[in-house]
Image (spheres, grey):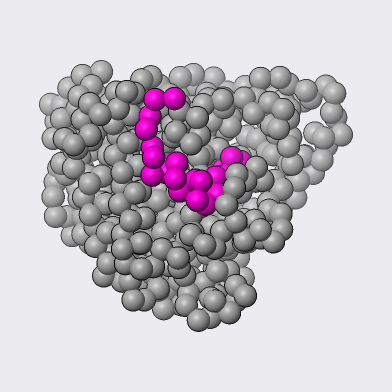
Amino acid sequence: MLAASVAAAPPNVVIIFADDLGYGDLGTFGHPTIHTPNLDRMAVEGQKWTNFYVAASVCTPSRAGLLTGRLPIRSGMVDDRVRVLFPDSHGGLPASEITIAEVLKKRGYTTGAIGKWHLGHQPRRLPTTQGFDTYYGIPYSNDMDKTEGSPKGDALWDDPDYKNFHVPLMRDEEIIERPVDQHTITRRYTEEAVRFIQANKSKPFFLYLAHSLPHVPLFRSREFAGKSLRGLFGDVIEEIDWSAGQVTQALKDSGVAGNTLVVFTSDNGPWLTFDEQGGSAGPLREGKGSTWEGGMREPTIFWWPGKLRPGVVHEMGSTLDLLPTIAKISGGDVPDDRVMDGYDLTPVLFGTGKSPRNQMIFYRGTRVFAARVGDYKAHYFTRSGYRDKTETPHDPPLLYHLGHDPGEHWDIAADHPDVLAAIQKAVDAHKATVKPVKNQLVERSPEALSDQGVKP
């Protein structure tokens, strides 16, 4: 039945990707004061996934993993010193990588990227070179490229002035505004997304809507200022929720909601060093930058009216699984000339079976810090995301039962040497598939490399 429907009318796909949204920052995932009625409704009408992981705990490698279905260690989008791309970076996602957009282009899809890219801002690295027909957004994080004379310390982040950040807004390969007025950025992304849906409603389309927020500095439009009980951070989340409602309403108004899969998730956990402006991982430990659960388990919703089996999904999934899943529902092909790390999740989406994902490998830079197999997770190294630079090796590894202890409080390694051995076997099997590739994150200007003591 699914194959026949795909052949007759390939479904549209929309991915909404937040930036630094914590596991506990949505109403449907337990936040007591942030009002997110649109996302809450999507979770009720669709599927709410409670064990869904991203490919990395920071922006650049996480985005690479989502779009390629491959752990970023395979594309060179990781490094142990330079963790993300910067305005003086010359690297980016290699042209040899195959993105979801490129898979769908072969199926005749119109493809559009809106929002934060952060996979390379040089002309050869932009979305329009990676399978996207159009691009509208900012090429890297909204806190980068600080202007000369901008405030220092907390003054830079509290009630920020967008002019302190020389961030460009781009359309395709052209800068159309600099610095971009970030107070209106969520609204403008949303309006662009609605126009994209309306313009392409008569043909299959793929829309990748990657919000710049709630990454600090926090901005919201005038309509959302002071709206949330949670303060500025809550205002930002409630505007993103409004955006999700506008997108789903546009799909309904265009008559294509019943033929569109929408996925909502985030690139990594909350940036906890910003305290009240940094969000919450809810019951999970730590946040952005770490391989504890709070850094890489994300609030995730799948929505496809009349097609998905509604409910709460406790099985494991990952952004790595989106490419093979989307390839399946669109009739596209998963690349067979390289190692893929994703699985097809359609058995869970359509209620025909279990999730094929039973394990997750947690990288920090180029090293495996942790691994999960079934309900158990082992930590070989631990380190706070940003608060503490101390790295602690563990021999034997720490071990947690995530079903009983999702907050990773109680180490049970001493009672389960057999589990540790099984996890180590899975890690060894994974490492055997990893081949060295060119590091993309240290391809920077000679001046920047010299300043940081980094050798190309």
**Residue 195: quarter of image:** bottom left
Q: In the image, residue 156 lies at what x, y percent? A: 21, 23
Q: In the image, residue 197 lies at what x, y percent? A: 31, 64
Q: Is residue 50 left or right of residue 441?
A: right
Q: In the image, residue 283 lies at what x, y percent? A: 56, 25
Which residue: 58% across, 69% down?
328
The part of the chain drawn in magenta is: 32-59
In this view of the protein, which residue sits in the foreground, 438 or 44?
44
**Residue 391: quarter of image:** top right
Q: Does 39 appear in magenta?
A: yes
Which residue: 22% across, 34% down?
224
Q: Is residue 127 left or right of residue 326?
A: left
Question: Is any part of residue 18 visible from this angle?
Answer: no
**Residue 221: quarter of image:** top left
Which residue: 14% across, 46% down?
178
All told, the count of numbered labels is 0
Q: Is residue 16 above or below residue 378?
A: below
Question: Is any part of residue 193 visible from this angle?
Answer: yes
Q: Quadrant of the N terminus?
A: bottom right
Q: Does 174 appear in magenta?
A: no
Q: Is residue 42 left or right of residue 121?
A: right
Q: Is residue 8 above or below residue 363?
A: below
Q: In the image, residue 426 lies at what x, y percent? A: 76, 46
Which residue: 71% across, 54% down?
354
